[in-house]
Image (cartoon, rainbow, N blue to C red):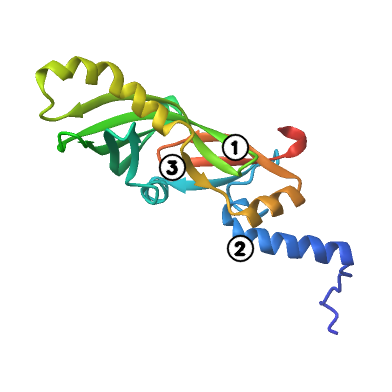
Amino acid sequence: MSASTVSVPITRRRCQALAAGAVLGSLIPSLSACATGTGIDGVRTQLLSRQRLNELLARQFPYTRSFGGLVDLSLQSPRLSLLPASNRLATAFDLVVTERIARSRFTGGMDLDYGLRFDAREGAIRMADARVNQLRIDQVPRAQQPLVSQYAPRIAEQLLADLVIYRFPPEQLELARNLGLTVGALQVTREGLRVEMLPQALR
């Protein structure tokens, strides 16, 4: 050993801490202790880009529900956008309504915005407080248009209530718990959704 070499004993506890940090870094790069998103208060962050969120949301569509076996409502092709000023997300959908008895088919579109909440039991980020801003169904008979305008937005909001936007991998949450971390604030930014992981004592 040269004179300039310093040997530092590595204890078993230190080995475990280093191993945990390495695994955490591989699972959650932005949550590792050396990530640039780590603040002096112990807050660690994960950023989900708009593109990533849209990809995850698109996997759940088309989303179709039947009402009394008479009418089918299908939402398709979600297109997600970010609303940092209100800390919400917005999504536009293509919409298809099929009336089975008359075999009529109507198309249209819908856009809504919504907040987010963390479901600790399911380890998922869910849609919350969805609000339909616009709902359009083309070629609806004039006599039925008032009913569509009155009830369709509320039905759509109920259909999408608590829809999962992102589900954390179980091993990621388990590791976070082992390191004393828990999901804190969910903040929509111009870059995407910022998820804060806080020490449980600060939650």
Residue 175: give its label.
none
Element type at marker 2? helix
Q: Which residue is mark 2?
A: 26
Which quadrant of the rendered structure holds the N terminus? Answer: bottom right
Farthest front residue in view: 101
In the image, which is nearer the foreground, mark 2 or mark 1? 1
Q: Position of residue 43 (x, y in %)?
A: 66, 41
- N-terminal of the pair, mark 2 or mark 1, is 2
Q: Which residue is mark 1?
A: 119
Q: Amino acid at mark 1?
A: Asp
Instruction: Give the answer, above or below, for where 162 lies relative to 166.
Output: above
Which quadrant of the rendered structure holds the C terminus? Answer: top right
Q: Residue, x 63% and y 46% (percent of image)? A: 38
Residue 192: give its label.
3
Element type at marker 1? strand
Q: Residue, x 22% and y 34% (percent of image)? A: 109
Q: Position of residue 55 (x, y in %)?
A: 38, 51
Locate residue 85 relative to residue 35 in the image: left or right.
left
- N-terminal of the pair, mark 2 or mark 3, is 2
